[in-house]
Amino acid sequence: MLQQLFSPSVLHTLDLIGIFVFAISGALLAVRKNFDVFGIAVLAEVTALGGGLFRDLVIGAVPPAAFTDLGYFVTPLLATVLVFFLHPHVERIQIGVNVFDAAGLGLFCVVGTTKAYDYGLGLTASACLGLATAVGGGVLRDVLANEVPSLLRWDRDLYAVPAVVGAALTALCIRYDVLNAGTSSLAVVTAFVLRLLAMRYHWRAPRAWHRRSTVQEE
């Protein structure tokens, strides 16, 4: 189905762009944590490829694409080199990095959902794997950096919710047999715009009502 929506070359190029941007976010966190060059490379690789690896292992697409396409492995290393030498400059364009990260989020939640469905999963499971594809690398990044994953923190702008919406829209398009290049692009753009709006207006998910905790918030 993916090949019917986009040409292989276009899909591969978009994948590499998304991987590169995700890898930059991982490498930047490693620099902030004062990791050495190996730690920076590991965090870049995990952030960029973790979600896709998890999806491929679950659906049985083995060996995963990250191990059969050298470009998938090398791209995070390029991001590592860039951040290692130029991280002060990269930090200054963090807003631009976040915009591309939002685009990667939208792309990966749609691609992940579609690929999972191609391998025989149901619509709900496919949407869940679409979400995992988009946010899984970030979760692994934060765990390795000894931080609470960003998507679990109430004080961070919505991240998982836009991916959920994009994956759900893709699943609905599959359900009603209207998934094509146009509708899949619409799902990508919807997730992308929601993420941008969340960053712009600091939208956050609600916490539990009537909290009575006496523990001081961190």
Image (cartoon, rainbow, N blue to C red):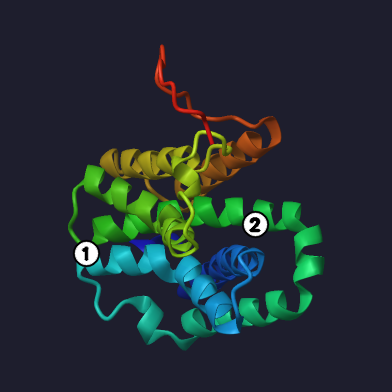
Say left or right for 96 vs 192.
right
When the figure is inspected, residue 140 is found, relative to residue 127, above or below; the finding is below
Please report the residue visible at 55 percent of the width from the left and 57 percent of the height from the top.
Answer: 104
x and y, in percent, of residue 116 in the image: 27, 58
Report the amino acid beneath label 2: Phe
Mark 2 residue crowding within 10 angstroms, few (<14) / some (14–19) / many (20+): some
Image quadrant assignment for residue 33: bottom right
Say left or right for 23 vs 210.
right
Say left or right for 86 vs 67.
right
Please report the residue visible at 79 percent of the width from the left and 59 percent of the height from the top.
Answer: 93
Please report the residue visible at 61 percent of the width from the left and 40 percent of the height from the top.
Answer: 193
Q: Nearer the viewer, residue 167 or 172?
A: 167
Residue bearing mark 1 = 59
Residue bearing mark 2 = 100
Q: Residue furthest top?
A: 210
Image quadrant assignment for residue 215: top left
Q: Nearer the viewer, residue 32 or 61?
A: 32
Separation of residues labelled 1 and 2 (CA atoms) = 27 Å
Report the amino acid beneath label 1: Ile
x and y, in percent, of residue 218 in the image: 54, 36
